[in-house]
Image (cartoon, grey):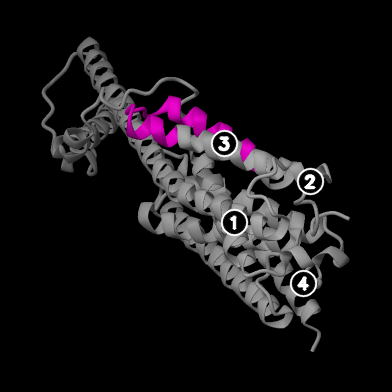
Amino acid sequence: MNWDIIQNLASQVVFVMLLFGVICYWINLYLFSFNLKTKFQLRTENLLFNLGKLCVLIGNCLLIFILFSRWIIAGYFPLSNLYESLLFLTWVLSTVYLYVESKTKSKLIGATLIPVALLINGFSNLTLTPEMQKASPLVPALQSNWLMLHVSMMLLSYGTLIMGSLLCILFLTISFYKKVDFNQIDFEKSLKSSNFLSETVDLYIQSSYFKTFFTNNTINDETSRSPFELPEFTSEEMDNEIAIIHSKYEKRSLELAELNKLTLLENLDNWSYRILGLGFPFLTIGIISGGVWANEAWGSYWSWDPKETWALITWIIFATYLHARITKGWKGRKTAILGGLGFFVIWICYLGVNFLGKGLHSYGWFS
């Protein structure tokens, strides 16, 4: 049994599953943009959403199979080269996404995050050569028990921090980079008010009914069952009444849309904070364990290697983010800018310095 062929085939299936999941999420997001939906559209939305989630779940399970099979066959934790680290990072992203989606039920997060996982998996399958995808014997410096702790913690931090940073970028995109004041609307009062939604629906019914009634100038069987009692109007009064109802309905619709937008932005802000707060300890543990491992392998805890330098920069950026949230009470645009900046710094730390081919961390990546 050729395990290399089986693992490569499984990795390609993961790519297909993620691609199909992205298509489902994007179509679902397009349907979600409609204000008024038929029952068919609602059923299609739910079907596509569940189908996309199922595809991500299948891809996640296949990634677990690939990583464990490589671990058993090679005899060491599969994080020794670029291909294995990309697979592990894809698994981390999909796992964190499945958890967050189960809590938020958001149709937007999957359409934003899964394309990134797809690009990472596509890069590992379509760009790297078959030789780079094969498991190879560990170089002496990697033959240590610190390999599992250090590299796994770093990649766990990369995955969680990338997702949190993406939510920050999504926050800035939806808010159009404008300052958002979460206190301008009492969310709790607005969401719990039973009159807010019911009055909006009533205004829509009245608007539709008045148009139907005044267009036909007669009460047919459908309009006669309306709960609204209509007095007799002159032609001018009819026009004024329709204009007033339409104005109220449009105003209430804008208020409802603004409320939904602010609620979404608040959820994105909270979840980005939680996820970045989870990834920061992983990054800290990864850096500390890497220092201890470096002292054992090279006799120095810190050598200002390019990878180490950018890891420190990444740590400082997210430490600043958390410090501003916890001690300064920053929320919204300010912290989202810090988180969005961290997204690009992470990629420089993860891949950028390795493209240079310099430093102590260049082995096992590009030859």
Q: Amino acid at mark 1?
A: Val
State the separation of the CA atoms marked 4 and 2. Answer: 30 Å
Residue at coordinates 72% horizontally, 65% vertically from top-left? 142
In this view, the residue in front, 81 or 121, is 81
Residue at point 48% right, 49% down? 279
- Find residue 242 and report its image quarter: top left
**What residue is pinned by disc 4?**
8
**Residue on which disc 3 sits:** 342
Which residue is drawn at the image coordinates 41% and 53% (left, top)?
Answer: 42
Report which residue position mark 1 lands on: 292
Residue 159 at least partly seen:
no
The range drawn in magenta is 321-346
Q: Is residue 345 magenta?
A: yes
Answer with mark 1 or mark 4, whichever residue precedes in sequence.
4
Helix, strand or loop at mark 2: loop
Q: Look at discs 2 and 1 and give the one toward the viewer.
A: 1
Which of these two is toward me, 293 or 135? 293
Measured in 3D between alpha carbons, the distance from the residue under mark 2 to the one under mark 1, in whole angstroms, is 18 Å
Q: Residue at x 71, y 68 (%)?
A: 11
- Considering the whole magenta stretch, tell me its main secondary structure: helix
Please give the label number shown on residue 153. Answer: none
- SS type, badge 3: helix
Question: Which residue bears the numbered disc 2?
Answer: 359
Q: Which numbered disc flags the more N-terminal residue, 1 or 3?
A: 1
Earlier in the chain: of badge 4 and badge 2, it is 4
Q: Position of residue 156 (x, y in %)?
A: 55, 56
